[in-house]
Image (cartoon, helix red, strand yellow):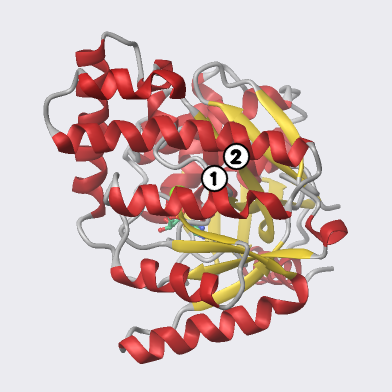
């Protein structure tokens, strides 16, 4: 049993004095490319990580739910009344109550349960520990209840838990990646149609690795800036007479920009339109097995986020520059911005040297040391045993 599954199991035994009926695991995710394209009805290309959140669980006969997480000493208990009123359960347990709520709201008879949660997904770093906990809890409750729900419907349910119960406005990307992700593949997601396609992304075969660097940058006004970018994109789409910026083709970009009268809006539009095209170009290269060649697209994505969308911070730019100088094929910030993580495509045997170069650049600038980990595309949510 993996260490994280063993921790969930030990937590279950200790809290509830019984054996769990099973263990369910869901991964974190990282977005390879396609940033701020989701709410513009565009394209994203995330992949599931080897890091997992594990839920050990068993049915509880009185129709109530108790949850414990190793992040918190105190277990939380709630019943149908609390689950049926978004916001009644707050704090981290809202992610669990939200899944119960979303299932019940969709008409499913959710069994009462005891749950114990352990996780290797860093919390709040932009690697989607939130979608991981939602997906693992969803899988556990569906299985315990003998409920049969096609996998294609899981992401929406988990998203509803986060949007409508927890109250965090996220798109469908995170839940899709952690639920539908497949080992050795990235998930090409059309955020307008929600169509998905598995794109081969076999780093091992290419002798490559993705280095994820946690910038440890303090989040600076991220929520307000995010809302401002969204508004700016909506206004621009309206001015251009399209439903969303996804409808501006890369070939028509210059003509579209000429119709916008302030330079900030032009830069925001240019980021979104060119970023959608970079996702499509990345997908084409990966389909052709040209993994190394996506590097320049990653780096161009970063430049676009830094100069046009203006969502990077000094720690993030430092990590990207240091990774590139140390031989990375490409590097970019991943996630919404103003902190979070950077990813770099590197030769597998150069990953440690690139990580060391980033750490040295951080030390030079007096930044808090970054976290680094090497990842490969892993499978999505699954029952362990
Ligand atoms: P991210 O998804 O990038 O890690 P979020 O802010 O979206 O960051 O989600 C983090 C929140 O999800 C945590 O603050 C906590 O409420 C909840 N969460 C995630 N993983 C766990 C866990 N293992 N145990 C308890 N709560 C968790
Ligand atoms: Mg999240």
In this picture, is 214 found above or below 41? below
Q: In the figure, is residue 284 to the left or right of 77?
A: right
Q: Nearer the viewer, residue 253 or 378?
A: 253
Tag 1–tag 2 contact (CB < 8 Å)? yes
**Residue that label 1 marks:** 33
Tag 1 secondary structure = loop
Measuring 21% from the left and 30% from the top, which residue is drawn there?
Answer: 231
**Residue that label 2 marks:** 45
State which quadrant residue 180 falls in.
top right
Tag 2 secondary structure = loop
Q: Percent x, y for residue 3?
A: 75, 73
Measuring 12% from the left and 25% from the top, which residue is drawn there?
Answer: 261
Q: Nearer the viewer, residue 124 or 318?
A: 318
Q: Quick one: label 1 or label 2, which is nearer the N terminus? A: 1
| CA separation in Å, label 1 and label 2 | 6 Å
Q: Percent x, y for residue 201?
A: 76, 47
User: Considering the image in quadrants, where does the N terminus appear?
Assistant: bottom right
Can residue 304 be seen here? The reply is: yes
In this picture, is 24 found above or below 64? below
Can residue 180 be seen here? The reply is: no
Q: Percent x, y for residue 151?
A: 72, 27
In this picture, is 129 found above or below 239? below
Q: Residue furthest left?
A: 262
The answer as to whether callout 2 falls within 8 Å of ligand 2 is no
Measuring 39% from the left and 38% from the top, which residue is drawn there?
Answer: 36
Q: Percent x, y for residue 339?
A: 35, 63
């Amino acid at each position: 049993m993996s260490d994280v599954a063993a921790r969930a199991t030990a937590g279950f035994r200790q809290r509830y004095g019984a054996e769990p009926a099973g263990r369910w695991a869901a991964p974190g995710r990282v977005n390879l490319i396609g940033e701020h394209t989701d709410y513009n009805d565009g394209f994203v290309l995330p992949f599931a990580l080897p890091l997992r959140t594990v839920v050990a669980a068993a049915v509880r006969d009185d129709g109530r739910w108790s949850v414990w997480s190793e992040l918190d000493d105190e277990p939380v208990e709630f019943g149908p009344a609390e689950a049926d009123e978004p916001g009644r359960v707050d704090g981290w347990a809202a992610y669990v109550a939200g899944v119960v709520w979303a299932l019940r709201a969709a008409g499913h008879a959710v069994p009462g349960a005891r749950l114990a949660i352990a996780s290797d997904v860093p919390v709040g770093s932009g690697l989607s520990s939130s979608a991981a906990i939602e997906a693992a809890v969803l899988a556990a409750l569906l299985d315990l209840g003998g409920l049969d729900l096609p996998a294609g419907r899981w992401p929406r349910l988990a998203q509803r838990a986060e949007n409508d119960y927890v109250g965090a406005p996220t798109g469908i990307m995170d839940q899709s990646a952690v639920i539908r992700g497949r080992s050795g593949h990235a998930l090409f997601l059309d955020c307008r149609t929600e169509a998905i396609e598995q794109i081969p992304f076999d780093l091992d075969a290419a002798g490559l690795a993705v280095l994820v660097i946690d910038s440890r940058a303090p989040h600076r006004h991220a929520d307000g800036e995010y809302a401002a970018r969204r508004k700016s994109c909506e206004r621009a789409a309206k001015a251009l007479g399209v439903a969303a910026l996804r409808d501006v083709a890369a070939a028509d970009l210059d003509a579209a920009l000429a119709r916008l009268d302030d330079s900030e809006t032009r830069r925001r539009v240019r980021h979104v339109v060119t970023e959608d095209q970079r996702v499509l170009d990345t997908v084409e290269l990966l389909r052709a097995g040209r993994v190394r060649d996506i590097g320049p697209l990653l780096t161009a994505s970063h430049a676009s986020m830094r100069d046009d969308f203006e969502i990077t911070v000094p720690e993030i730019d430092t990590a990207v520059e240091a990774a590139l100088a140390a031989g990375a094929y490409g590097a970019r910030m991943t996630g919404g911005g103003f902190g979070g993580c950077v990813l770099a495509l590197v030769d597998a045997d150069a990953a440690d040297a690139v990580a060391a170069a980033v750490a040295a650049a951080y030390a030079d600038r007096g930044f808090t040391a970054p976290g680094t980990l090497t990842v490969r595309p892993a499978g999505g949510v699954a029952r362990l045993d």
